[in-house]
Every structure is written in C-alpha cells, then in structure tokens.
Amino acid sequence: MARELQPHQLIERSLIKKYRKELWNPFIEGVQRYALVQDGDRIAVVADGTAAAAMTVLLLQQLQRVSQTDFTVVPVLLQGNTQAAALAERLRLSCETVAPETANEPSALLAALSCNKLAQGTCRTDVVNEAMTAMLYRGRLEGVLPQTAVTGGSVILPLFCIGQEAIAAWVRYNALPVSETERPPENAAAQAVLRDIQKVNPDLERNVFQSLHAVCRDTLPGYIQDGQQHSFLERFDADNNKE
C-alpha cells in the first residue's frame, strides 16, 4: 500500500509529475546547458515569499535528491518577512536567517552563509521582457546571462528556461499564498507589448528567447564587446584591404 504524502510533499511532487514538461524538464535543460550546478557547490536561495523563489528552492532540492552531482542548497529567510516565513513553513523549508541589508549584496550574502553561489528566480519571461525593455526604452539590444561572476562566487538563474505562465499555473494548482514581484513601470509596459503580440503569435516569447542565443553579429551595424563600441566598418574596411 502506497504511503500517503504530506501536503508539502504533494506540492513538490507536482513539479516533477503534473508539471514535468513545463517546469522540471526546462529546469534540467537550463542547469545542464549553462553548467549552473557543480560538485561542491553551496547554493543560497533567498526565500522571499515569491513564487519564483519558492520554486527555485524546491527544484534545486529535488535535483539534489536525484542527481549524482554533490551540492548543497541553503534556503534563506530575511528577518522580519513574516509572509515569506509562513510560506517556508508550509513548504517545510529549513532556512537560515539573515538581515535584509545582507541580502542586498550578493557577495556579502555568500560570505555570510559560506556559499559560493546565489540562485535567483529570474525566469524566461523575465529574460525576454528585459530584452524588450532595453530595446524600447534604452535603445540597446541586451540580454541576461544565466550565470554571472561576483566576488566570492556567482549568481545563477535556474529558472532561465521556464516561462512565467507555467510558474503561475503551478501556484494556482497548489493554492500557494505568494508575494507579487515588484517590477519597474518600463518592464510592465514592455510586457504589455509582448502580450498583445502573443495574441497573434503564441510562440513570440520562445522565439525572442531563442534569438538571444543566435545573434547574427555579421548583420549588425554596431555592437558592444567588453565595454567597447564597435562598428561594422571595422570588418568592412578590413575586407576591402584584403582585395
């Protein structure tokens, strides 16, 4: 006779059963594609009460159970965040506690917890939205890196390949009381543009995301590399000089 699962175990199970295609599989794709988790890692995750943070903790903990990679997940609560603490209790997360000012600086947080990586809940929708915001409001084509070096380690984005709609569906299915993620007005406006276009082209988000991995630099009149501005004329003049 199969044992009856506890409520928090059913929530975890839904990540790899009901939402395997939408959540677990793209999570594994991102971890492997961008080499986010290595042997010996101690990965901090700030459980701030948002859906993305909760999912990041649970997915990494599930990976820890089934993976041959030897790493540790360190969920973190901010002092005074009672809503986040209540959600962590419901999910049965064993958390470290730090002052909010410590969490504001990734390097300080890593040092305080003796961790070498900080996992954040940026998802594929956020990545696409940031690219659109940069084009519409800053006149630049910019992306978001799935892993960024900081003093003492790196910041990783395990939800990089997961769409926001799948996260929201998981939250509704499990009736989780999560906090809303605050977004700048520019982000909200860019997201509205994306949603309007998606009514005509449902594949828009996936296509924009893929385009960030397939930039055709040869067709761009200008680009920035290592902080330096470059022009297509550099290549154009070099090719002419060869003739």
Image: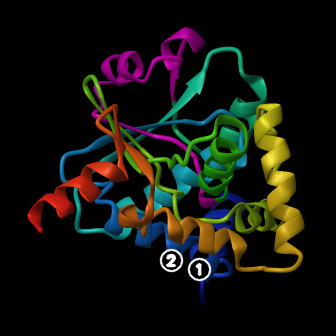
- Which is more N-terminal, label 1 or label 2? 1
Quarter of the picture containing the N terminus is bottom right
* Residue 54 appearing in the image: no
Question: Start and end of the magenta stretch?
Answer: 96-124
- Residue at 41% of width from left, 46% of height from top? 223
Residue highlighted by disc 1: 20
Real-space Cα separation, disc 2 to disc 1, in angstroms: 6 Å
Q: Is residue 43 above or below residue 170?
A: above
Residue highlighted by disc 2: 25
How many callouts does the rendering have?
2
- Residue at 85% of width from left, 63% of height from top? 195
Q: Mark 2 Cα within 10 Å, few/some/many (few <14, many 20+)? A: some
Q: Is residue 156 above or below residue 236?
A: above
Q: Is residue 88 above or below residue 63?
A: above
* Residue 231 appearing in the image: yes
Q: Amino acid at mark 1?
A: Arg
Q: Nearer the viewer, residue 207 or 176?
A: 207
Q: Mark 1 Cα within 10 Å, few/some/many (few <14, many 20+)? A: some
- Residue at 25% of width from left, 25% of height from top? 152
Q: Residue furthest bottom?
A: 1
Dots 2 and 1: beta carbons under 8 Å? yes
Question: Any magenta on residue 134?
Answer: no
Q: Which mark is residue 235?
A: none
Question: Any magenta on residue 115?
Answer: yes
Q: Position of residue 40 (x, y in %)?
A: 19, 46
Q: Is residue 172 left or right of residue 112?
A: right
Image quarter of residue 118: top left
Q: Position of residue 133 (x, y in %)?
A: 69, 44
| SS under mark 1 | helix
Q: Amino acid at mark 2?
A: Asn
